[in-house]
């Protein structure tokens, strides 16, 4: 679910060009409030495509729909409709209590409030339909690569077998609102029958779906919706005294002489009309599969639905209404899943495209890049969720040993902090007997003897604020002693920095994760002293493991912008812990050897070009190949260090040397 939300968020951002948040809602609804897309329910693999289509649909509402028009709909209805006439048509009158008859009786005064509510409910449905056609057409034209997701959405909610059968049958052919709304919202279905109800062809021409992009605003969509409403209302007969708006007897349409499949008031479609419809369908509304050809406008054989099919039809119609009203119902997920999804959202997880121009999956190709997962913060809830393999509490049998390593690192850090004196050193020089500055009180008495050099100046020399970004290789080859060694050193530096003036530390771990069925590089920002307390290291670092491969430069690229921006105006350092050559491979990229080393070296050079001092520690094991060391040096250059990071003195000397030479 978490991976799906990330993927859908990226789809919406790419298609709309806006940073529109996509959030999960444990309620039974999917909607947009104009600023955020909310999707609901348990998204399974088979539902992924229609869910993406739904998110794109709602995201395009955020981009294109004027929600103020919806908020002012009540005023629009009052200004544009004859509410008295509508109230009389549907027998909507005020009533009062009659003591004599002990019941409510008609006062003969029309109930404009009820008439307004009736118009608003119907008009809003029609407006939603027209506006959906307008915004979906926008996405279809501006992001053709995403058409498949829209087709999956509409195939799920509109183009079902029972809908196709109903359109060919005598169902929903009564002169009532339900029948008209069913025929209206299915006008893009190739099985539509324009002779099913009077003036369906007029409605079709009013919509003019082929030229739907003529509608540039929600207000223009509302004007079209008003015209469609008036066409429908003109064909619905006046209610009898005991009927209410929208009532009708579906399935019994043949009882009235003016209803049924051929009830088009003498407006049978000509061959020219049919040809025009077929031509339009090829370039029809963007929400349907383009190129589908409409069936003959009049069914050659009437299909009768069984009682079970009629029940299925009502359920299918309800799903369609829910989609149009933005009230898609799906199953809820468990409380645990909700908490896990919330933890991922709170972590700021996102994906970035990295590795463009490196070697593709097949050796003769060039990669267009691959996704890299960036997790901006970790928390106990993220650990407990088990969403990510790199940070998990499943390996409880290793946590005691890991905690001992962290505690040792904190103790070493306390000692190291005392040795990192260079950043705490401040030089204060006082110059006296000067011709300008502040008066030295001790020399005031000499003014009486004509001595004028009685001023003093104080010069202070101290280090500017600085930030250190430590990036640790969390690949499987780092496990065992190498992992313990790098963890001790990393924690020690963070602890030491907390004891030094104006020195912040950020710690990240490079690994790989599964998103759906695809493995991607991943980098986790585990600690940031600008917002985290040192206790976070004590409490959470025992859960960090090294299960991945070595994406190296791909991960550096993913956070390059953050590293560079955080270095503006201050001293900046980048420290790397790794054990050799980079490697990563998936369906998008083949990242290893000289090509991967060159890409990593480029990322390091980019940091140096921005004034960031780079220091890289080679974490060696019992068996280490010279080729790995040589590649390590080629990536990190003269700043490569091959010291034993478990030994405090060499580590302190190395760090002091870097701090002193920036």
Image (spheres, rainbow, N blue to C red):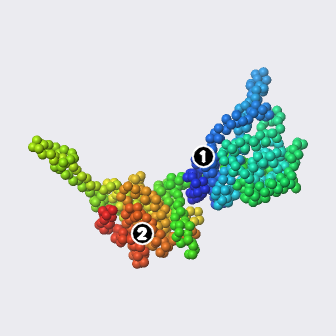
Location of residue 567 (image quadrant): bottom left
Q: Residue at x 41, y 76 (%)?
A: 630
- Residue with the mark numbered 1: 34
State the image coordinates of residue 509 (x, y, percent, origin top left). Answer: 45, 63
Query: In this figure, which residue is indicated by the disc labeled 2?
Result: 578
The one nearer the camera, 565 or 449, is 449
Residue 288 appearing in the image: yes
The outermost residue toward the bottom is 626
- Give the side of residue 523 with respect to residue 495, left or right: right
Q: Residue at x 49, y 68 (%)?
A: 551
203 or 128, nearer to the observer: 203
The residue shown at (50%, 60%) is 374
User: What separation in Å lies between label 2 and label 1 (alpha carbons)?
Assistant: 46 Å
Q: Is residue 301 above or below residue 487?
A: above
Q: Is residue 451 above or below residue 89?
A: below
Point out which mark residue 471 bears. Answer: none
* Mark closer to the observer (2, 1): 1
Determine whether 199 is above or below 373 in the image.
above
Find residue 570 and report its horizontal and vertical position in percent. 36, 56
In the picture, the quarter occupied by the C terminus is bottom left
One can see residue 172 in this view? no
Q: How many marks?
A: 2
Quarter holding the N terminus is bottom right
Residue at the left extreme, as displayed: 449
Q: Residues within 10 Å of mark 1 (few under 14, many from 20)?
A: some
Nearest to the observer: residue 345 or residue 501 = 501
Between residues 402 and 322, which one lies in front from this camera angle?
322
Give the x, y percent position of residue 627: 42, 78
């Amino acid at each position: 679910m978490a991976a799906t939300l990330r993927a859908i968020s990226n789809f919406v951002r790419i298609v709309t060009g806006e940073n529109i948040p996509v959030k999960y809602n444990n309620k039974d609804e999917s909607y947009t409030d104009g600023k955020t897309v909310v999707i609901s329910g348990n998204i399974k693999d088979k539902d992924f495509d229609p869910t993406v289509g739904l998110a794109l649909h709602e995201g395009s509402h955020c981009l294109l729909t004027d929600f103020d028009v919806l908020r002012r709909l009540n005023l629009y209805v009052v200004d544009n409709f004859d509410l008295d006439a509508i109230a009389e048509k549907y027998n909507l009158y005020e009533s009062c209590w009659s003591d004599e008859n002990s019941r409510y009786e008609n006062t003969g005064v029309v109930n404009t409030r009820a008439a307004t509510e009736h118009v608003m409910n119907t008009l809003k449905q029609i407006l939603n339909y027209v506006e959906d056609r307008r915004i979906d057409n926008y996405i279809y034209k501006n992001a053709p690569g995403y058409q498949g997701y829209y087709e999956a959405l509409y195939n799920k909610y509109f183009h079902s077998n029972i809908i196709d059968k109903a359109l060919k049958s005598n169902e929903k052919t009564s002169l009532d609102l339900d029948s008209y709304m069913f025929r209206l919202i299915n006008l893009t279905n190739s099985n539509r029958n324009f002779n099913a109800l009077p003036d369906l062809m007029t409605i079709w021409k009013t919509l003019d779906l082929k030229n739907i992009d003529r509608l540039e605003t929600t207000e223009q969509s509302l004007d079209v919706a008003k015209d469609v409403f008036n066409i429908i209302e003109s064909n619905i007969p006046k209610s009898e005294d005991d009927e209410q708006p929208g009532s009708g007897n579906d399935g019994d349409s043949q009882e009235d002489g003016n209803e049924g499949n051929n009830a088009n008031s003498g407006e049978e479609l000509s061959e020219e009309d049919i040809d025009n419809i077929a031509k339009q369908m090829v370039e029809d509304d963007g929400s349907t599969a383009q190129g589908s050809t409409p069936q003959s406008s009049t069914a050659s054989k009437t299909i009768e639905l069984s009682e079970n099919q009629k029940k299925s039809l009502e359920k299918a119609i309800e799903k369609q209404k829910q989609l149009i009203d933005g009230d898609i119902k799906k199953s809820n997920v468990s409380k645990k899943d909700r908490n896990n999804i919330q933890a991922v959202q709170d972590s700021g997880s996102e994906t970035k495209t990295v590795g463009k121009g490196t070697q593709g999956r097949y050796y003769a190709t060039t990669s267009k890049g691959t996704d890299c997962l960036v997790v901006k913060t970790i928390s106990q809830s993220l650990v407990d969720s088990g969403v990510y393999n790199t940070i998990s509490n499943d390996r409880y049998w290793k946590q005691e040993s890991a905690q001992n390593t962290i505690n040792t690192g904190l103790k070493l850090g306390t000692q190291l902090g005392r040795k990192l004196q260079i950043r705490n050193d401040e030089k204060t020089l006082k110059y006296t007997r000067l011709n300008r500055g502040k008066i030295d009180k001790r020399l005031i008495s000499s003014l009486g003897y004509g001595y004028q050099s009685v001023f003093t100046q104080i010069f202070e020399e101290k280090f500017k604020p600085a930030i250190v970004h430590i990036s640790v290789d969390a690949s499987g080859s780092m496990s065992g002693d190498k992992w313990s060694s790098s963890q001790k050193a990393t924690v020690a530096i963070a602890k030491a920095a907390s004891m030094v003036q104006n020195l912040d530390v950020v710690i990240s771990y490079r690994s790989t994760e599964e998103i759906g069925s695809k493995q991607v590089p991943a980098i986790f920002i585990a600690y940031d002293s600008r917002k985290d307390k040192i206790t976070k290291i004590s409490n959470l670092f025992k859960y960090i493991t090294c299960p991945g491969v070595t994406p190296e430069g791909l991960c550096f690229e993913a956070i390059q912008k953050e590293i560079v921006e955080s270095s503006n105006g201050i001293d900046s350092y980048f420290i790397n812990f790794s054990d050799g050559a980079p490697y990563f491979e998936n369906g998008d990229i083949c990242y290893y050897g000289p090509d991967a080393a060159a890409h990593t070296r480029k990322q390091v050079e980019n940091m140096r070009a921005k004034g960031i001092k780079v220091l890289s520690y080679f974490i060696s094991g019992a068996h280490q190949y010279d080729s790995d060391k040589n590649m390590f040096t080629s990536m990190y250059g003269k700043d490569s260090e091959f010291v034993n990071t478990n030994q405090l003195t060499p580590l302190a000397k190395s760090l002091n040397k870097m701090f002193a030479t920036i």
